[in-house]
Amino acid sequence: MKDLAVRLAALDAQAGAAVQVIAYFDGLAEAGAGLQSIVRGAAVLAGCPARLDDTTRRVHIRMLPDGAAEAAPDRAGDRWPCLDAGTAVLALERDGEAGPVDAMILERAAGAARAVLDRTRGRAPATDEPALVELLVDATAPAEARLRAARLLGLAPDGTARVSVGHTGVIRISAVAADPLPGRCGVGPAVAIPDLPVSFEAARIALRFTADGTDDDPGDPVVRHDDLGALAVLAAVAEPGSVPDVRALDHATVPWLLATLHAVTTTTSLRAAAAKLRLHHSTLQDRVTQAEHLLGWSLHEPHGLLRTQLALALRRLQRNS
Amino acid sequence: MSIAPPFDPELSAALSVIGEQLPPALTPEMIPLMRGGGEVLPAISDDELRRDGRFTVEERSVPGLDGDPDISLLICRPTAPTGTLGCVYHTHGGGMIIGDNRLGVTEMLDYAERFSLVVVSVEYRLAPETPHPGPVNDCYAGLLWTAAHAGELGFDPGRLVVAGASAGGGLAAAITLMARDLGGPALLGQLLICPMLDDRNESPSAVQMAGRGIWDRTANATGWGALLGAAAGGPDVSPYAAPARATDLSNLPPAFIDVGSAETFRDEDVTYASRIWQAGGRAELHVWPGGFHGFDGMAPAAALSQDARQARVRWLDRLLNA
């Protein structure tokens, strides 16, 4: 296949190379080739390492262009060309310029891999099997039972995972990067499997900082606990709605106040805030002056902006308590 | 049509691409086409042979056998060898009808780097222009010269191995028989890669693989016909043309024989190994399931190819280092 790769690279007409890629992967499929063969074919034909990762099914295959298997280093290269193969992801570890038939290789190899995964590994285990998930995030459950639940959910007992909690109470455990749920969602940190209850508590805290993203409730619908930093301690405030600054927000009667404050505190200039709000900057200037009057503190000074941010955060905590 | 063993999945896929350029059946009219251009057999440059200066490369003209024309030997010597040098004397493949002394040398250089070997590859005359015994005599003459010049080439004459693939495997087996019978050089081993051994071309594997894979029964008849003419398959074929014809396979150096289960040569190669054992000799036999003829050369990245190459390396390691 080295010869094959040389020939493919040498072909002037990309159409000819594409036809050979198709013939190769069709040949693999017809012969009932397995995942290793498919990933190896992608690596050989592309001339760079190729990998297939299916966290749910715990399939990790990485092949070098000479056909040798090599354990996968930590996943890197977010700009690698990749394609979904069902629950798996097939990627070419190509950092430079794309090869002439990369897209064709990905398409054909991913299609073949998906078919093999569906045939040989069965349906992907549902990661939201509620009883197992609840067991995994329950710190009071026996450690043995939690590890068994992890295995049943297709999680490597010695790996890491993170918990996401949706506003409807749905809990999801994911071993890959963020896997946000629809709507408002808090995401906990990646932790060792036995520490998932910690990630769960963190995700619940993060969920309280989320907002609908509407004028009445401006803010981010997805909040990662990792990003909260020291703000997270605000979640311990017993009655955030009773804090005077929050009351000041709630008692304001102008409909644009919350959206304006959110924009001003999440951008680096009034001009940027105006653009975000789709307002002329002089209009925003007028509103800011009016808001300062209503609230009784400055929206130009860092201290005033911090007060505003804290008030907005505490208001979300009140709404999501 | 008889049922044939399936190809290994990866090899089957490679074959679906290769088959476009290399049909299973080759007829005599196709010989010029097969020889022409570098499309079927890519050319290997001196630079590739030198491997960034790790080998010196020379073509040496040496006498043919008994007044035959001079023959050319490609000699690649390691520039920084470790320990005692050995030598692999290589006879290239190509069905007796195509190829030159650079075909297959890349693999020999891999072994040479690993085991500190001089590589000598002989440019024998091809059939049908030169029928038997010309080609094998050229190979034997080159072997004699190589063994006699071990000192000049810098290798230990006790570490001389012959090696070849396909027709080159048959020629390597043949010169091993000649060396035994004619008082030639002592050989440490014979590395016979999917060797072409039997002109009779009627084994069950030859029959069941007709029209399939690489080098099918028709192609095999073309090769043997070119070498032997009307004598092919008849009663009077020399074992130096077709080693399967040898009645005595005793007192031979250790043999390594490998072959694919899905190729013409499967049964004749298995038989050759069995007959060496029956004669009290040493042979190591590998039959790679679903391998077509020459699979590891054409699809070196495939899992089965990697295993096949490693098996040869392990045999050489035992032969040279045990």
Image (cartoon, coloured by chain):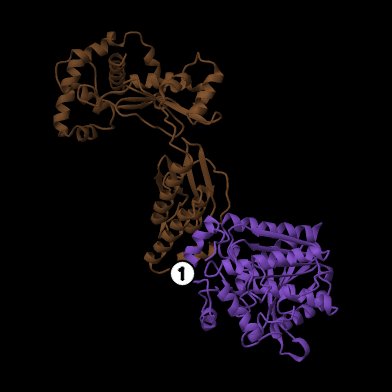
Chain colours: A brown, B purple
Q: Is residue B204 visible?
A: yes
Q: Chain of mark 1?
A: B
Residue B20 position, x and y percent, is 46, 69
**Considering the numbered disc 1 on the image, is that residue within a helix, a strand or a loop?**
loop
- Give residue B248's quadrant in the image: bottom right
Instruction: Name the amino acid type tagged 1.
Output: Glu
**Residue at x 39% of width, y 32% of height:** A179
Residue visible at 30% across and 25% down? A184
Q: Where, quadrant-wise, is the C terminus of chain A in this rendering?
A: top left
- Residue A72, percent from left and from top: 54, 43
Q: Is residue B276 left or right of residue A28?
A: right
Residue A176: quadrant of the picture: top left
State the residue in front, A14 or A216.
Answer: A14
- Number of residues whose C-alpha sits closer than 10 Å to that of mark 1, classed few (under 14), some (14–19) or many (20 or more): few
Can residue B126 be seen here? Answer: no
In the picture provided, is B12 more to the left or to the right than A106? right
| Residue at screen point 14% across, 19% down | A254
Looking at this view, name the residue that lies furthest to the bottom. B67
Q: Nearer the viewer, residue A147 or A257?
A: A147
Vertical order, B236 against B207 (above or below): below
Kindly give the residue lying farthest to the right in the view shown: B183
Total labels: the figure holds: 1
Q: Quadrant of residue A170?
A: top left
The residue tagged 1 is B20
User: Relative to the observer, which residue lies in front, A251 or B292?
Assistant: B292
Of residue A20 and residue B275, the one placed in the foreground of this image is B275
Percent across and percent down for residue B35 are: 55, 80
Q: Is residue A56 above or below residue B149?
A: above
In the image, is residue B153 above or below residue A177?
A: below
Residue A37 location (% of width, % of height) = 52, 52
